Image (tube, rainbow, N blue to C red):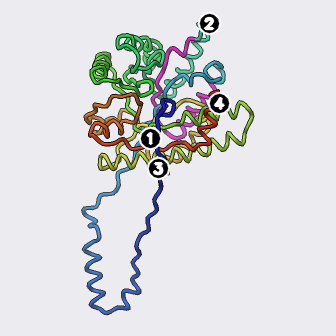
Protein backbone atom coordinates (compact mmCIF):
# COMPACT_ATOMS: atom_id res chain seq x y z
CA UNK A 1 0.00 0.00 0.00
CA UNK A 2 2.61 2.48 1.06
CA UNK A 3 5.14 1.54 -1.64
CA UNK A 4 2.47 1.90 -4.30
CA UNK A 5 1.99 5.49 -3.20
CA UNK A 6 5.66 6.26 -3.84
CA UNK A 7 6.74 6.25 -0.23
CA UNK A 8 10.50 6.25 0.27
CA UNK A 9 11.76 4.41 3.31
CA UNK A 10 15.13 3.80 4.86
CA UNK A 11 16.26 0.32 5.75
CA UNK A 12 16.32 -0.33 9.47
CA UNK A 13 19.82 -1.13 10.71
CA UNK A 14 20.50 -3.78 13.37
CA UNK A 15 22.81 -3.09 16.27
CA UNK A 16 24.29 -5.77 18.49
CA UNK A 17 25.02 -5.07 22.11
CA UNK A 18 27.21 -7.08 24.42
CA UNK A 19 26.32 -7.52 28.06
CA UNK A 20 29.04 -7.16 30.66
CA UNK A 21 29.56 -10.32 32.70
CA UNK A 22 30.07 -10.68 36.43
CA UNK A 23 32.46 -13.46 37.50
CA UNK A 24 31.83 -14.29 41.20
CA UNK A 25 34.83 -16.67 41.54
CA UNK A 26 37.38 -14.06 40.50
CA UNK A 27 35.75 -11.57 42.88
CA UNK A 28 36.06 -13.96 45.81
CA UNK A 29 39.80 -14.27 45.20
CA UNK A 30 40.18 -10.55 45.93
CA UNK A 31 40.50 -8.90 49.34
CA UNK A 32 37.39 -9.18 51.59
CA UNK A 33 36.92 -5.40 51.62
CA UNK A 34 36.77 -5.35 47.83
CA UNK A 35 34.30 -8.22 47.86
CA UNK A 36 32.05 -6.50 50.39
CA UNK A 37 32.15 -3.26 48.44
CA UNK A 38 31.31 -5.06 45.20
CA UNK A 39 28.41 -6.89 46.83
CA UNK A 40 27.04 -3.65 48.26
CA UNK A 41 27.17 -1.97 44.87
CA UNK A 42 25.54 -4.97 43.19
CA UNK A 43 22.70 -5.00 45.72
CA UNK A 44 22.19 -1.26 45.36
CA UNK A 45 21.97 -1.48 41.58
CA UNK A 46 19.80 -4.59 41.42
CA UNK A 47 16.10 -3.92 40.72
CA UNK A 48 13.81 -4.53 43.65
CA UNK A 49 11.47 -7.51 43.16
CA UNK A 50 8.72 -5.52 44.86
CA UNK A 51 8.89 -2.66 42.38
CA UNK A 52 9.81 -4.40 39.11
CA UNK A 53 6.63 -5.23 37.20
CA UNK A 54 6.72 -8.04 34.65
CA UNK A 55 6.47 -7.00 31.02
CA UNK A 56 2.86 -6.77 29.90
CA UNK A 57 1.84 -9.51 27.46
CA UNK A 58 1.70 -8.35 23.88
CA UNK A 59 -1.62 -8.25 22.05
CA UNK A 60 -2.61 -7.87 18.41
CA UNK A 61 -5.94 -7.52 16.61
CA UNK A 62 -5.86 -8.99 13.11
CA UNK A 63 -7.73 -7.24 10.29
CA UNK A 64 -8.06 -8.00 6.58
CA UNK A 65 -8.90 -5.42 3.90
CA UNK A 66 -10.45 -5.60 0.42
CA UNK A 67 -12.85 -8.50 0.92
CA UNK A 68 -14.11 -10.68 -0.57
CA UNK A 69 -10.64 -10.91 -2.12
CA UNK A 70 -7.78 -8.94 -3.62
CA UNK A 71 -8.65 -6.99 -6.74
CA UNK A 72 -6.91 -7.58 -10.04
CA UNK A 73 -6.15 -11.24 -9.28
CA UNK A 74 -7.47 -14.60 -10.41
CA UNK A 75 -9.13 -14.91 -7.02
CA UNK A 76 -11.35 -11.93 -7.77
CA UNK A 77 -12.80 -13.55 -10.92
CA UNK A 78 -12.74 -17.24 -9.98
CA UNK A 79 -15.43 -17.76 -7.34
CA UNK A 80 -14.51 -21.40 -6.51
CA UNK A 81 -10.84 -20.37 -6.06
CA UNK A 82 -11.94 -17.42 -3.91
CA UNK A 83 -14.05 -19.72 -1.77
CA UNK A 84 -11.20 -22.22 -1.33
CA UNK A 85 -8.73 -19.46 -0.45
CA UNK A 86 -11.18 -18.11 2.12
CA UNK A 87 -11.69 -21.55 3.67
CA UNK A 88 -7.92 -21.94 4.08
CA UNK A 89 -7.68 -18.56 5.77
CA UNK A 90 -10.59 -19.27 8.10
CA UNK A 91 -9.11 -22.64 9.07
CA UNK A 92 -5.84 -20.90 9.93
CA UNK A 93 -7.68 -18.32 12.05
CA UNK A 94 -9.54 -21.11 13.84
CA UNK A 95 -6.35 -23.00 14.62
CA UNK A 96 -4.67 -19.81 15.86
CA UNK A 97 -7.78 -18.81 17.86
CA UNK A 98 -7.58 -15.40 16.20
CA UNK A 99 -10.73 -13.23 16.00
CA UNK A 100 -10.59 -11.24 12.76
CA UNK A 101 -12.38 -8.24 11.24
CA UNK A 102 -12.60 -8.29 7.45
CA UNK A 103 -13.28 -5.02 5.63
CA UNK A 104 -15.51 -5.31 2.58
CA UNK A 105 -15.66 -3.52 -0.76
CA UNK A 106 -19.18 -4.47 -1.85
CA UNK A 107 -18.44 -3.27 -5.37
CA UNK A 108 -16.30 -6.40 -5.80
CA UNK A 109 -19.41 -8.55 -5.51
CA UNK A 110 -20.72 -7.25 -8.82
CA UNK A 111 -18.70 -7.80 -11.99
CA UNK A 112 -19.89 -6.39 -15.30
CA UNK A 113 -21.29 -9.11 -17.54
CA UNK A 114 -21.91 -11.56 -14.69
CA UNK A 115 -25.29 -12.60 -13.33
CA UNK A 116 -26.76 -11.67 -9.97
CA UNK A 117 -26.42 -15.34 -9.07
CA UNK A 118 -22.63 -15.02 -9.34
CA UNK A 119 -22.72 -11.88 -7.20
CA UNK A 120 -24.67 -13.84 -4.60
CA UNK A 121 -22.01 -16.55 -4.70
CA UNK A 122 -19.40 -13.93 -3.82
CA UNK A 123 -21.66 -12.73 -1.02
CA UNK A 124 -21.70 -16.34 0.12
CA UNK A 125 -17.92 -16.15 0.50
CA UNK A 126 -18.41 -13.20 2.85
CA UNK A 127 -21.00 -15.24 4.74
CA UNK A 128 -18.29 -17.81 5.48
CA UNK A 129 -16.46 -15.16 7.53
CA UNK A 130 -19.52 -14.40 9.62
CA UNK A 131 -20.44 -18.06 10.08
CA UNK A 132 -16.90 -18.69 11.36
CA UNK A 133 -17.50 -16.10 14.10
CA UNK A 134 -15.59 -13.20 12.55
CA UNK A 135 -16.77 -9.67 11.94
CA UNK A 136 -17.16 -7.62 8.76
CA UNK A 137 -16.57 -3.89 8.37
CA UNK A 138 -17.10 -1.26 5.67
CA UNK A 139 -14.19 -0.40 3.36
CA UNK A 140 -16.42 1.64 1.01
CA UNK A 141 -18.17 0.29 -2.07
CA UNK A 142 -15.51 1.05 -4.66
CA UNK A 143 -12.23 1.53 -2.75
CA UNK A 144 -11.72 5.09 -3.97
CA UNK A 145 -9.48 7.69 -2.34
CA UNK A 146 -10.79 10.18 0.24
CA UNK A 147 -7.83 12.43 -0.59
CA UNK A 148 -8.98 12.91 -4.18
CA UNK A 149 -12.77 12.44 -4.11
CA UNK A 150 -15.34 15.10 -3.12
CA UNK A 151 -16.56 14.54 0.42
CA UNK A 152 -20.24 14.14 -0.48
CA UNK A 153 -19.40 11.59 -3.19
CA UNK A 154 -17.18 9.65 -0.80
CA UNK A 155 -19.86 9.59 1.90
CA UNK A 156 -22.32 8.11 -0.59
CA UNK A 157 -19.75 5.46 -1.47
CA UNK A 158 -19.70 4.48 2.20
CA UNK A 159 -23.50 4.14 2.19
CA UNK A 160 -23.39 2.09 -1.03
CA UNK A 161 -21.00 -0.29 0.72
CA UNK A 162 -23.42 -1.19 3.51
CA UNK A 163 -26.43 -3.30 2.36
CA UNK A 164 -24.93 -6.77 1.86
CA UNK A 165 -22.57 -6.48 4.81
CA UNK A 166 -25.36 -5.30 7.12
CA UNK A 167 -27.57 -8.18 6.00
CA UNK A 168 -24.90 -10.81 6.59
CA UNK A 169 -24.09 -9.48 10.04
CA UNK A 170 -27.78 -9.23 10.95
CA UNK A 171 -28.19 -12.93 10.15
CA UNK A 172 -25.99 -13.57 13.20
CA UNK A 173 -27.50 -10.83 15.35
CA UNK A 174 -24.58 -8.46 14.80
CA UNK A 175 -24.38 -4.91 13.51
CA UNK A 176 -22.05 -3.08 11.15
CA UNK A 177 -19.82 -0.91 13.34
CA UNK A 178 -16.28 -0.55 11.88
CA UNK A 179 -14.97 1.52 8.98
CA UNK A 180 -11.51 1.32 7.42
CA UNK A 181 -10.18 4.07 5.12
CA UNK A 182 -9.06 2.85 1.68
CA UNK A 183 -5.30 3.30 1.33
CA UNK A 184 -5.39 4.52 4.97
CA UNK A 185 -5.92 8.00 3.49
CA UNK A 186 -7.69 10.25 6.00
CA UNK A 187 -7.74 13.48 3.97
CA UNK A 188 -5.45 16.26 2.84
CA UNK A 189 -6.84 18.89 5.21
CA UNK A 190 -8.14 18.68 8.75
CA UNK A 191 -11.56 20.17 8.00
CA UNK A 192 -12.32 17.40 5.51
CA UNK A 193 -10.98 14.74 7.85
CA UNK A 194 -13.11 15.94 10.76
CA UNK A 195 -16.22 16.35 8.60
CA UNK A 196 -15.89 12.78 7.36
CA UNK A 197 -15.29 11.45 10.87
CA UNK A 198 -18.46 13.25 12.00
CA UNK A 199 -20.37 11.60 9.15
CA UNK A 200 -19.07 8.17 10.19
CA UNK A 201 -20.00 8.72 13.82
CA UNK A 202 -23.49 9.73 12.75
CA UNK A 203 -23.90 6.37 11.03
CA UNK A 204 -22.64 4.46 14.06
CA UNK A 205 -19.14 3.69 12.82
CA UNK A 206 -15.90 3.42 14.72
CA UNK A 207 -12.80 4.10 12.62
CA UNK A 208 -10.56 1.04 12.57
CA UNK A 209 -6.98 2.33 12.84
CA UNK A 210 -3.89 0.40 11.81
CA UNK A 211 -0.62 0.36 13.72
CA UNK A 212 1.15 -2.48 11.89
CA UNK A 213 0.99 -1.30 8.29
CA UNK A 214 3.30 -3.11 5.90
CA UNK A 215 4.12 -3.99 2.29
CA UNK A 216 2.64 -7.49 2.46
CA UNK A 217 0.78 -6.83 -0.78
CA UNK A 218 4.14 -6.50 -2.61
CA UNK A 219 5.07 -10.04 -1.59
CA UNK A 220 1.55 -11.30 -2.34
CA UNK A 221 1.49 -10.02 -5.92
CA UNK A 222 4.93 -11.46 -6.67
CA UNK A 223 3.97 -14.74 -4.98
CA UNK A 224 0.77 -15.06 -7.02
CA UNK A 225 2.72 -14.38 -10.20
CA UNK A 226 5.35 -17.00 -9.36
CA UNK A 227 2.66 -19.59 -8.70
CA UNK A 228 0.86 -18.70 -11.92
CA UNK A 229 4.10 -19.24 -13.85
CA UNK A 230 4.82 -22.50 -12.06
CA UNK A 231 8.01 -21.09 -10.51
CA UNK A 232 7.86 -23.02 -7.24
CA UNK A 233 11.39 -22.10 -6.04
CA UNK A 234 10.61 -18.40 -6.45
CA UNK A 235 7.25 -18.75 -4.71
CA UNK A 236 8.93 -20.54 -1.80
CA UNK A 237 11.68 -17.94 -1.57
CA UNK A 238 9.12 -15.13 -1.50
CA UNK A 239 7.00 -16.85 1.15
CA UNK A 240 9.99 -17.45 3.40
CA UNK A 241 11.28 -13.89 3.06
CA UNK A 242 7.76 -12.60 3.72
CA UNK A 243 7.90 -14.13 7.20
CA UNK A 244 11.32 -12.58 7.83
CA UNK A 245 10.11 -9.20 6.59
CA UNK A 246 6.96 -9.28 8.71
CA UNK A 247 8.98 -10.06 11.83
CA UNK A 248 11.17 -7.03 11.07
CA UNK A 249 8.01 -4.91 10.79
CA UNK A 250 6.76 -6.15 14.16
CA UNK A 251 10.13 -5.40 15.76
CA UNK A 252 10.13 -1.92 14.23
CA UNK A 253 6.58 -1.10 15.38
CA UNK A 254 7.30 -2.37 18.89
CA UNK A 255 10.26 0.00 19.05
CA UNK A 256 8.25 2.98 17.78
CA UNK A 257 5.56 2.25 20.36
CA UNK A 258 8.07 2.15 23.21
CA UNK A 259 9.84 5.30 22.02
CA UNK A 260 6.66 7.31 21.50
CA UNK A 261 4.41 6.00 24.26
CA UNK A 262 6.82 4.49 26.76
CA UNK A 263 5.20 1.08 26.35
CA UNK A 264 3.88 -1.35 23.79
CA UNK A 265 0.18 -1.03 23.06
CA UNK A 266 -2.25 -3.61 21.68
CA UNK A 267 -1.44 -3.47 17.98
CA UNK A 268 -3.77 -3.58 14.97
CA UNK A 269 -2.38 -5.56 12.03
CA UNK A 270 -3.42 -4.97 8.41
CA UNK A 271 -3.33 -7.87 5.94
CA UNK A 272 -5.16 -8.96 2.77
CA UNK A 273 -7.03 -12.15 1.89
CA UNK A 274 -4.57 -13.34 -0.73
CA UNK A 275 -3.05 -16.72 -1.54
CA UNK A 276 0.17 -15.86 0.30
CA UNK A 277 -1.62 -15.39 3.61
CA UNK A 278 -3.84 -18.41 2.99
CA UNK A 279 -0.68 -20.49 2.62
CA UNK A 280 1.45 -18.86 5.30
CA UNK A 281 -0.81 -17.48 8.02
CA UNK A 282 -0.06 -20.52 10.24
CA UNK A 283 3.64 -19.60 10.21
CA UNK A 284 2.86 -15.89 10.52
CA UNK A 285 0.69 -16.59 13.55
CA UNK A 286 3.43 -18.77 15.04
CA UNK A 287 5.88 -15.88 14.63
CA UNK A 288 3.53 -13.58 16.52
CA UNK A 289 3.04 -16.10 19.32
CA UNK A 290 6.82 -16.59 19.56
CA UNK A 291 7.11 -12.83 20.11
CA UNK A 292 4.67 -13.09 23.02
CA UNK A 293 1.50 -11.94 21.28
CA UNK A 294 -2.00 -13.08 22.03
CA UNK A 295 -4.77 -12.51 19.53
CA UNK A 296 -7.53 -10.15 20.67
CA UNK A 297 -10.69 -8.73 19.14
CA UNK A 298 -10.41 -5.29 17.59
CA UNK A 299 -12.84 -3.98 20.19
CA UNK A 300 -10.49 -5.06 22.99
CA UNK A 301 -7.43 -3.51 21.35
CA UNK A 302 -9.18 -0.16 20.87
CA UNK A 303 -10.01 0.07 24.57
CA UNK A 304 -6.38 1.05 25.16
CA UNK A 305 -6.15 4.75 25.99
CA UNK A 306 -3.52 5.26 23.29
CA UNK A 307 -6.23 5.11 20.64
CA UNK A 308 -7.80 8.21 22.16
CA UNK A 309 -4.65 10.29 21.69
CA UNK A 310 -4.82 13.60 19.81
CA UNK A 311 -4.47 12.93 16.08
CA UNK A 312 -4.30 15.80 13.61
CA UNK A 313 -2.44 13.99 10.84
CA UNK A 314 -3.46 14.81 7.26
CA UNK A 315 -1.43 14.27 4.12
CA UNK A 316 -0.86 12.23 0.99
CA UNK A 317 0.44 9.12 2.72
CA UNK A 318 -1.48 6.24 4.24
CA UNK A 319 0.55 5.41 7.34
CA UNK A 320 0.38 3.67 10.70
CA UNK A 321 -1.52 5.47 13.45
CA UNK A 322 1.75 5.43 15.40
CA UNK A 323 3.08 7.67 12.64
CA UNK A 324 -0.07 9.80 12.97
CA UNK A 325 0.79 10.36 16.61
CA UNK A 326 4.46 11.02 15.89
CA UNK A 327 3.55 13.72 13.38
CA UNK A 328 0.88 15.20 15.67
CA UNK A 329 3.56 15.63 18.34
CA UNK A 330 5.86 17.36 15.86
CA UNK A 331 8.21 14.41 15.55
CA UNK A 332 9.76 13.13 12.36
CA UNK A 333 8.07 9.99 11.08
CA UNK A 334 10.16 6.89 11.80
CA UNK A 335 11.23 5.16 8.55
CA UNK A 336 9.65 1.72 8.17
CA UNK A 337 11.38 -1.44 6.92
CA UNK A 338 11.27 -2.08 3.16
CA UNK A 339 11.15 -5.38 1.29
CA UNK A 340 14.54 -6.17 -0.28
CA UNK A 341 15.20 -5.01 -3.82
CA UNK A 342 14.77 -8.46 -5.37
CA UNK A 343 11.22 -8.63 -3.98
CA UNK A 344 10.37 -5.17 -5.26
CA UNK A 345 11.65 -6.13 -8.72
CA UNK A 346 9.54 -9.30 -8.67
CA UNK A 347 6.51 -7.19 -7.74
CA UNK A 348 7.17 -4.73 -10.55
CA UNK A 349 7.55 -7.59 -13.04
CA UNK A 350 4.25 -9.08 -11.88
CA UNK A 351 2.51 -5.74 -12.34
CA UNK A 352 3.59 -5.41 -15.98
Q: Which comes sooner in the sequence, label 3 or label 1?
A: 3
Q: Nearer the viewer, residue 98 or 119?
A: 119
| Mark 1 / mark 2, whichever is N-terminal | 2
Mark positioned earlier in the residue sequence (1 or 4): 1
- Density class for disc 3 (Cα within 10 Å; few <14, some 14-19, many ≥20) is some
Reading the image, the residue beneath label 3 is: 12
Front: mark 3 or 1: 3
| Image position, residue 61 (x, y; %) | 42, 37
Depth check: give the residue in front, 188 or 285. Answer: 188
Q: Which mark is residue 280?
A: none
How far separated are the C-alphas under marks 1 and 4?
A: 33 Å
Q: In this view, does 173 lie to the left or right of 233?
A: left
- Residue tagged 2: 115
CA gap, disc 3 to disc 1?
Answer: 26 Å
Magenta residues?
82-110
Residue at 53 percent across and 30 percent down: it is 272
List the residue tagged with mark 4.
350
Few, some or many residues within 10 Å of mark 1 (<14, 14–19, 20+): many
Where residue 15 appears, x then y in whole percent?
45, 59
Tag in front: 1 or 4: 4
Amino acid sequence: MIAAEGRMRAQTSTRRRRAARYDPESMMRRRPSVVLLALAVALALAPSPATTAPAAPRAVAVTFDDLPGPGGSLLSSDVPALRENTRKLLAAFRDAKAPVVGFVNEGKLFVEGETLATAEQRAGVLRLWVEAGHELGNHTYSHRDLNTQPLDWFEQDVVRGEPVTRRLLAEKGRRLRYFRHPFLHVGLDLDKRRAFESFLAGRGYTVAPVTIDNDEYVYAAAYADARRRGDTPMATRLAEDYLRYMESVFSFIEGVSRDLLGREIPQVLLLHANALNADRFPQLGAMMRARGYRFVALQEALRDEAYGRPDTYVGPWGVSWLHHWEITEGRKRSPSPDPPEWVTKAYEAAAR
